[in-house]
Image (tube, grey):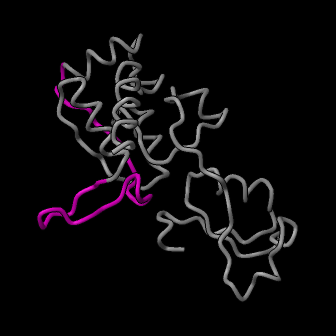
Amino acid sequence: MKFKKWILVVCSMLASMILVACQSGTDSSQSAVDAIKQKGKLVVATSPDYAPFEFQALVDGKNQVVGADIDMAQAIADELGVKLEISSMSFDNVLTSLQTGKADLAIAGISATDERKEVFDFSIPYYENKMSFLVRKADLDKYKDLTSLASANIAAQKGTVPETMVKEQLPNAQLTSLTNMGEA
């Protein structure tokens, strides 16, 4: 129950700040809020493959996107008095959708990098993620540090910070960029 109260507090703060891309074509966050209210819906771009934040589940026999971030998006839509529309896509398209104005908000476990902050407004962080590698138990002795991964076969999700890190820090690794990390 504490988590739900915390989410509602965060939602209220986020709704008042409105998480809209700087490139949304509006002059201020207030006019962005007005535009959302005028069209009567909040369009949220997400990649529903990051449980428990956003994922697909059968609800009343229908495949739906659910999770903590979706609950937060619903609270923001409720605060604005509009309908919530979830737009599911691969992670590498989430920020593009926001930047091109196809979505009003992006929620998908997005890391606030300096490069991304130049283009987008981010909420106050509400979850801290630590980067890590997942290796087969049989390979634990083989992969002990970053240097040992220099020529490894590595899978990363397209458009993510880990994909960028592999490209920059392990240029000789065999990178496989995946649309969905479930494919790894």
Q: Nearer the viewer, residue 75 or 148?
A: 75
Residue drawn 75% across the image and 84% down it: 139
Residue 101 place in picture, x, y as percent:
37, 31
* 27 vs 44: above or below: above
Residue drawn 85% across the image and 72% down it: 148
Q: Answer with the quarter of the image where residue 118 lies.
A: top right
* 120 vs 30: above or below: below
Q: Is residue 167 left or right of residue 107?
A: right
Residue 35 place in picture, x, y as percent:
26, 18
Residue 77 place in picture, x, y as percent:
24, 31
Q: Answer with the quarter of the image where residue 30 lies.
A: top left
Q: Is residue 84 left or right of residue 149?
A: left
Residue 172 place in picture, x, y as percent:
81, 67
What is the magenta range? 38-66
Q: Answer with the quarter of the image where residue 78 lies.
A: top left
Residue drawn 72% across the image and 59% down it: 166
Residue 54 located within the stretch drawn in magenta? yes
Q: Residue furthest bottom?
A: 138
Q: Main secondary structure of the magenta part?
A: strand
Q: Quadrant of the C terminus?
A: bottom right
Q: Residue furthest right?
A: 147
Residue 100 located within the stretch drawn in magenta? no
Q: Is residue 76 left or right of residue 111?
A: left
Q: Is residue 166 left or right of residue 81?
A: right
Q: Nearer the viewer, residue 142 or 35?
A: 142
Residue drawn 48% across the image and 63% down it: 179
